Image (cartoon, helix red, strand yellow):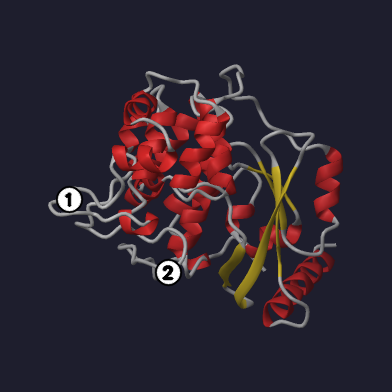
Amino acid sequence: MDRRTWDCSAVVDRVEPQPGLGKPVEAGSGRATFRLGHVGKANHLGDYLRARRGRVTPAEVGLVPGPRRRLAGLRRDELALLAGISSEYLQRLEQGRDRHPSSEVLDSIARALRMDAKATAYLHQLAHPTSRPHHAPHEQVSAAIAELINQFPMPAVVVGRYQDVLAANPIARALSPEFEVGQNLSRWRFLDPAAKQVYPDWDEAAALAVRGLRELSAEDPNDPRLLALISELSSGSERFKQLWEQADVGYPKGINHMRHPEVGELYLTRTQLHLAQSPGQHIITLHAPANSTSTRALDQLRASLLHDSVSDR
């Protein structure tokens, strides 16, 4: 069968809010967000702090909002009080006038903003970045890793620092056109109409890609190739811009709801495996519980691949 034939006739032009990841901030909520216009400037730490401060309401941390409040998020003095630091010092951090906060201060801010472990790690990385040259090397996958994923029975792909698909086993490529080698996960999900056919919960899948891209950006947020990708996606997709402004970080555990034109609906658990020997690269696997409908769909897809392979001989 032709793995590249995907019906895009029912593309939805307007993104509807979906439950779960990436739920849009309601219009008129007053909740502050991180503005994409700041991307590429040197004050990534301050941008991130303002974004996360704007997402936590006073009620969520036990404060009384008070009358005539202009923002739904925390004011600077409220966050400073919760974190046990001075408002003046927090202002210096947000304005980029103090770029060397201690780990203790960062942890206090993270607790006050109710950050999870990945968001906290990202905060520390922005405050204490690893120095690296600005270049865009051609990423490659070792022969051993490529051989390894080809032996996996479930869909598996190797993704690089910029979310490029560096390697994919046959069943992954058959599952979705986004898993073709050379494809970029974020670019495909936001700019290819087929994405909304493959992902019935498209907004959740789109938010997942943005969270992953932000996590990968922590090592060097000034990377020119990374900034070019963010600029391209923000210009091509208003939803990408909105999600980037929300400043969520990291792939959470969860289920990918996917639709295949031949085997139907699948609900696949995603797992991320970091490759220590190749910084910035990771393996993503998708599997389903034994004897489930999704497992039977994968078995059907695998059998079709075997049939095609035999027919080609």
CA distance for labels 2 and 1: 28 Å
Taking the image as shown, residue 159 lies to the left or right of residue 30, namely right
Q: Residue at x 22, y 48 (%)?
A: 71
Compared to residue 254, the image places residue 70 above or below, namely above
Neighbor class of circle 1 (other Cα within 10 Å; few <14, some 14-19, many 20+) is few
Taking the image as shown, residue 12 lies to the left or right of residue 185, namely left
Taking the image as shown, residue 141 lies to the left or right of residue 115, namely right
Amino acid type, residue under disc 2 in the picture: Pro
Pick the residue in front: 158 or 261: 158
Q: Secondary structure at mark 2?
A: loop
Compared to residue 293, the image places residue 280 above or below, namely above
Q: How many marks?
A: 2
- Would residue 24 be seen by someone viewing this image from the given angle? yes
Amino acid type, residue under disc 1 in the picture: Arg
- Would residue 196 be seen by someone viewing this image from the given angle? no
Which image quarter is the C terminus in? bottom right
The percent coordinates of residue 207 (x first, y second) are 46, 55
Residue 69 is tagged as 1
The percent coordinates of residue 173 (x first, y second) are 67, 57
Q: Residue at x 58, y 54 (%)?
A: 178
- Residue at image mark 2: 19
